[in-house]
Every structure is written in C-alpha cells, then in structure tokens.
Image (cartoon, rainbow, N blue to C red):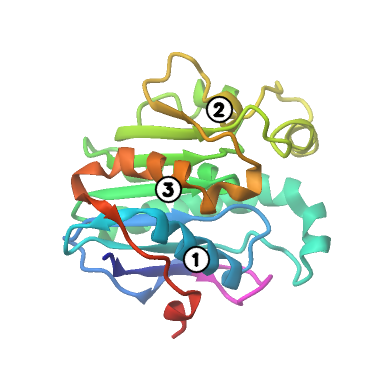
Amino acid sequence: MFDPLWLTIRTAPAAGSMKEKVDEVLRPPSNAPWLIYIHGFNVPEARAKEQWAVLRGLLPTATRGVFAGPFLWPSDRYERRSLSRSSYASILSKRADEAGRILGRYLRERAHGDVVLVGHSLGARVALVAATAFQSGRPQRLRGLALLGAAVPISDMTGVFWDQLAVVEAVGVSPADRVLGRPFRFGQLISAPFAPRTEAVGLRGWPEDRDWSRVDCQIDHHEYWRAKRSAEVVAKVSERWMERTPASAASPLEWSV
C-alpha cells in the first residue's frame, strides 16, 4: 500500500483561484519517495480524487514508505463544467504553467527523496513545467516522469522541454485519441495563434528521438486514469518501488479530511 499524500493549490473544491504556495493537506516526510498524480483540464477536486483512487487501485503494491497522492490545481474556471470548456485557452496559457512552477518550487524546497510525477492530459504540461523548475540550476533530476495522453505539442518537446527531465521517462499514447486530434489543434490556435501547430505528444509519443518508453494504450482520452495500460506506464517509471500484486481500488472517501 501507498502512504497518502495530498497537495493542493486550490482555493475552492470547484472553480476558484490559485494559491501562491502548495498547501500540504496530507504532508509527506521530506526524505521519503513521492509519487504525485496531476490531473488535467476542467477537473474539480472531487473528480481528481476519484481519478487518483481508481488509478492507484490499478498499480502494483508499493514497498513500504512510499507516499503517493494527487496534486490539485484549479483547472476548472467555473463550477459548471460545461461552461469551463470555453476557458481552455486561458487555462493552457496561464494556469497550467503557473501551477507547474509552484509545484516545482515546492519540490525543490521539500522533496529530498526520489520523486515521480504522473501527468494526465493538460496535467502532463503541469508535470513538465514542474520537472523543469525542480531541475533548474541543480544536477538532480526527478526519479520518474509519466505522461498519459499528454496535451502538449511536439514542438514544446524540442523547445522548452528539450532536455531529459527524469532518470526514467514514459508516455501513454493513443493515435485514436479524439480529444488530442482536432480539438487540441483548435486549442493551440486560440491560445497561441502565431505559434507553429504540431500534433500532441499523447497521440504517438513523438518526437521520435526522445529517449522514453512508449505504451500504446488504445483508449479514449478520458479513460487513461482507469486503464490498466496507464498503470503499466506508471510502473515503468517507479519500478524500483513496486511489488507484483496490484492494490485494490481505493474509495475516494478515504481522501476526505
């Protein structure tokens, strides 16, 4: 079993603004191994906890002393999720990057053991920014970086995220992902109309020369957090902590405080 951690920069369970520093709702020891799940766009707090509880239940049992849990960030602008969909461009250009910088600074200050980041969809961008901030000016890298259905353009992986950011990196991809097709391209156009538009990393795991493991999950974009192949991706970057037997799915109620 994992020991629980719970980090947040939310000011409200749904919608709300962003805190300037990470709030340790369930504080992990600084010298312990950490595995942090980062949700994607338009996900309120309750749904993020549910996603993590389901994904955690698919993972192999961890060795003792590994702390794991969600990093909650305000990726939903309005309480009604249908209204929040229209805010994708602003969330992409501002909140995701800022959330990543806040998390990265926190990890630099608090994390003295191995760290694995798992980012789904737009949460993959948060993870990449956090990994970059964590590594800035120091030789230490993350232990592992897993990106599931990454809503990140390939051009960014050859630009701002060109360097290897973790000892072990892996991506879960799906060429049939409908969200990362036309909707993702449209979001790129709105958020950065003059930037080159390239396909999302989560479609094929490109750029081809990136030295990371690729797992073809063959699933819909919104199924990653409950797919066994996603657990395979996470296990690849945290293998040293894992035993063979998967844990049983945990109830989201366990995250109520």
Name the kind of residue labelled 1 in the image. Glu
Q: Which residue is at 16% across, 60% downward?
A: 31
Which residue of the protein is positioned furthest toward the top in this rendering?
Answer: 209
- Per the rendered image, the range of residues in magenta is 9-20
Q: Residues within 10 Å of mark 2 (few under 14, many from 20)?
A: some
Q: Say which of marks 3 and 1 sits in front.
A: 3
Q: Do the residues labelled 2 and 3 touch (CB within 8 Å)?
A: no
Q: Which residue is at 79% across, 54% downward?
A: 85
**Residue 123 visible in image:** yes
Q: Position of residue 156 (x, y in %)?
A: 55, 27
Q: Earlier in the sequence, mark 1 or mark 2?
A: 1
* 10 part of magenta stretch: yes
Q: Relative to 175, is 168 on the left or the right?
A: left
Q: Relative to 156, is 108 on the left or the right?
A: left
Q: Name the residue under label 2.
A: 156
Q: Which residue is at 49% across, 66% downward?
A: 20
Q: Distance between the residues labelled 1 and 2?
A: 25 Å
Q: How crowded is mark 1: few (under 14 residues within 10 Å), some or many (20 or more)?
A: few
Q: What element carries label 1?
A: strand
Judging depth in this view, the residue of 41 and 149 nearest the camera is 149
Q: Which of marks 3 and 1 is nearer the N terminus?
A: 1
Q: Say which of marks 1 and 2 sits in front.
A: 2
Q: Relative to 185, is 217 on the left or the right?
A: left
Q: Relative to 68, is 11 on the left or the right?
A: right
Q: Position of residue 105 (x, y in %)?
A: 37, 54
Name the kind of residue labelled 2 in the image. Asp
Q: Earlier in the sequence, mark 2 or mark 3?
A: 3
